[in-house]
Image (cartoon, grey):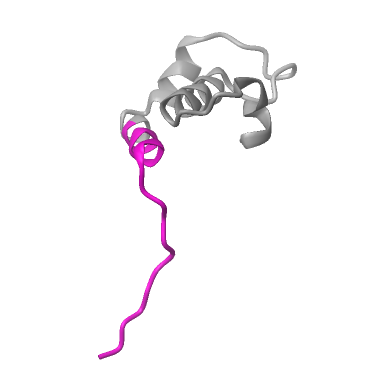
Amino acid sequence: MDVQFELAVPSGIVTMVEAFFTSMRLQEVLDEMLPYDEEQCKLTPGQRLLGLMLCVFGGREALYRVKEFY
Protein backbone atom coordinates (compact mmCIF):
# COMPACT_ATOMS: atom_id res chain seq x y z
CA MET A 1 0.00 0.00 0.00
CA ASP A 2 1.45 3.34 -1.09
CA VAL A 3 0.38 6.20 1.21
CA GLN A 4 1.07 9.82 0.29
CA PHE A 5 0.73 12.62 2.77
CA GLU A 6 -0.22 16.18 1.95
CA LEU A 7 0.94 19.20 3.85
CA ALA A 8 -0.17 18.97 7.47
CA VAL A 9 -2.17 21.95 8.66
CA PRO A 10 -2.43 22.63 12.38
CA SER A 11 -6.00 22.62 13.59
CA GLY A 12 -7.39 24.68 16.36
CA ILE A 13 -9.71 27.54 17.07
CA VAL A 14 -7.76 30.03 14.92
CA THR A 15 -7.89 27.75 11.88
CA MET A 16 -11.60 27.18 12.37
CA VAL A 17 -12.35 30.89 12.87
CA GLU A 18 -10.33 31.84 9.79
CA ALA A 19 -12.14 29.22 7.68
CA PHE A 20 -15.49 30.50 8.98
CA PHE A 21 -14.64 34.12 8.17
CA THR A 22 -13.31 33.13 4.75
CA SER A 23 -16.48 31.20 3.92
CA MET A 24 -18.54 34.26 4.92
CA ARG A 25 -16.31 36.54 2.79
CA LEU A 26 -16.06 38.78 5.86
CA GLN A 27 -12.83 40.46 4.75
CA GLU A 28 -14.27 41.41 1.35
CA VAL A 29 -17.48 42.72 2.91
CA LEU A 30 -15.58 44.84 5.42
CA ASP A 31 -13.33 46.23 2.67
CA GLU A 32 -16.39 47.26 0.68
CA MET A 33 -18.16 48.86 3.66
CA LEU A 34 -15.27 50.70 5.35
CA PRO A 35 -13.59 53.59 3.55
CA TYR A 36 -9.79 53.78 3.47
CA ASP A 37 -7.03 55.43 1.47
CA GLU A 38 -5.12 52.77 -0.50
CA GLU A 39 -2.10 55.05 -0.84
CA GLN A 40 -1.69 55.48 2.92
CA CYS A 41 -2.68 52.01 4.12
CA LYS A 42 -0.58 48.89 3.70
CA LEU A 43 -3.44 46.67 4.87
CA THR A 44 -7.15 46.91 4.13
CA PRO A 45 -9.65 47.36 6.97
CA GLY A 46 -10.79 43.77 6.42
CA GLN A 47 -7.24 42.44 6.80
CA ARG A 48 -6.71 44.48 9.95
CA LEU A 49 -9.95 43.39 11.59
CA LEU A 50 -9.49 39.75 10.58
CA GLY A 51 -5.98 39.75 12.04
CA LEU A 52 -7.20 41.36 15.24
CA MET A 53 -10.07 38.88 15.59
CA LEU A 54 -7.77 35.92 14.99
CA CYS A 55 -5.41 37.19 17.67
CA VAL A 56 -8.26 37.66 20.13
CA PHE A 57 -9.78 34.22 19.42
CA GLY A 58 -6.33 32.64 19.48
CA GLY A 59 -5.62 33.94 22.96
CA ARG A 60 -2.70 36.15 21.99
CA GLU A 61 -2.08 38.75 24.65
CA ALA A 62 0.40 41.13 23.01
CA LEU A 63 -1.86 42.83 20.49
CA TYR A 64 0.67 45.58 19.85
CA ARG A 65 2.80 42.97 17.99
CA VAL A 66 0.02 41.87 15.63
CA LYS A 67 1.84 43.50 12.70
CA GLU A 68 4.84 41.23 13.25
CA PHE A 69 2.64 38.13 13.38
CA TYR A 70 1.02 38.83 10.01
- Magenta span: 1-20
Image height of 24 relative to 14, above or below: above
Image quarter where the C terminus lies is top right
Which sits in the foreground, 49 or 60? 60
Which sits in the foreground, 11 or 2? 11
Q: Main secondary structure of the magenta part?
A: loop
Which sits in the foreground, 48 or 41? 48
Residue 2 location, x and y as percent? 30, 88
Q: Residue at x 45, y 17 (%)?
A: 30
Residue 21 location, x and y as percent? 36, 30
Q: Is residue 40 left or right of residue 54?
A: right
Verify whether residue 36 appears in magenta: no
Verify whether residue 18 appears in magenta: yes
Residue 13 location, x and y as percent? 35, 37
Image height of 20 relative to 2, above or below: above
Residue 68 location, x and y as percent? 68, 33
Image quarter where the N terminus lies is bottom left
Picture quadrant where residue 65 is located: top right
Q: Residue at x 66, y 20 (%)?
A: 64
